[in-house]
Image: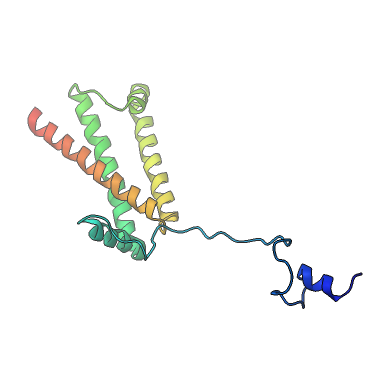
């Protein structure tokens, strides 16, 4: 064994940590992953504060997020139902994946669509503390709302 200076230099238990060359020692550092909700960041733009408060509300109130995810799933089901209605009236599916599944069997297309959105909802629920997951949920809700509006306008014009 060596003298006491070896023990101090390499940081053995009981030694003073501030003494010795720390550059020779290998230290393991845990890198913390941020959730995207940095309190120091300022909201950009006029609506940035509102968007930030909506995201914080979804993060801090799980029932509100559950309601939004339920609404996304209901919109998904309504979109599929209205798509089947439009196809029976002579329309055409724009999504190539759904078009091929609908050509195979509408039941398989419905099962795939429902399973995909349910799986995405579960993933968002598990990652609800991350800003990006909540932003994606709001984006999907907005897109599905626009698709439903498109279907309703199409029904009004075709009637």
Task: Specify the quadrant of the image occupied by residue 42.
Answer: bottom left
Q: Is residue 21 above or below residue 158?
A: below
The residue positioned 38% from the left and 30% from the top of the image is: 108
Q: Position of residue 36 (x, y in %)?
A: 40, 57
The residue positioned 73% from the left and 62% from the top of the image is: 25
In the displayed structure image, the side of residue 117 where residue 16 appears, left or right: right
Q: Position of residue 85 (x, y in %)?
A: 20, 30
Residue 125 makes an appearance in the image: yes
The residue positioned 39% from the left and 35% from the top of the image is: 112
Q: Quadrant of the C terminus?
A: top left
In the displayed structure image, the side of residue 51 where residue 10 appears, left or right: right
Task: Specify the quadrant of the image occupied by residue 100.
Answer: top left
Q: Position of residue 63 (x, y in %)?
A: 33, 62
Count of numbered marks: 0
Who is closer to the viewer here, 115 or 142? 142
Q: Quadrant of the N terminus?
A: bottom right
The residue positioned 35% from the left and 65% from the top of the image is: 60
């Amino acid at each position: 064994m060596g003298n006491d200076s070896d023990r101090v230099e390499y940081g053995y238990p009981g030694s003073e940590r501030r003494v010795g060359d720390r550059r020779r020692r290998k230290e393991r550092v845990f890198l913390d992953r941020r959730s995207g909700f940095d309190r120091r960041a300022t909201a950009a733009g006029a609506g940035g504060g509102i968007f930030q408060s909506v995201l914080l509300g979804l993060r801090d109130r799980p029932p509100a997020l559950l309601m939004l995810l339920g609404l996304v799933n209901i919109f998904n089901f309504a979109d599929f139902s209205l798509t089947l209605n439009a196809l029976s009236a002579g329309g055409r599916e724009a999504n190539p994946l759904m078009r091929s599944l609908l050509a195979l069997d509408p039941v398989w297309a419905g099962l795939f669509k429902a399973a995909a959105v349910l799986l995405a909802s579960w993933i968002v629920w598990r990652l609800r503390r991350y800003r990006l997951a909540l932003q994606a949920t709001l984006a999907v809700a907005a897109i599905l709302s626009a698709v439903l509006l498109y279907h309703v306008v199409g029904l009004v014009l075709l009637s």
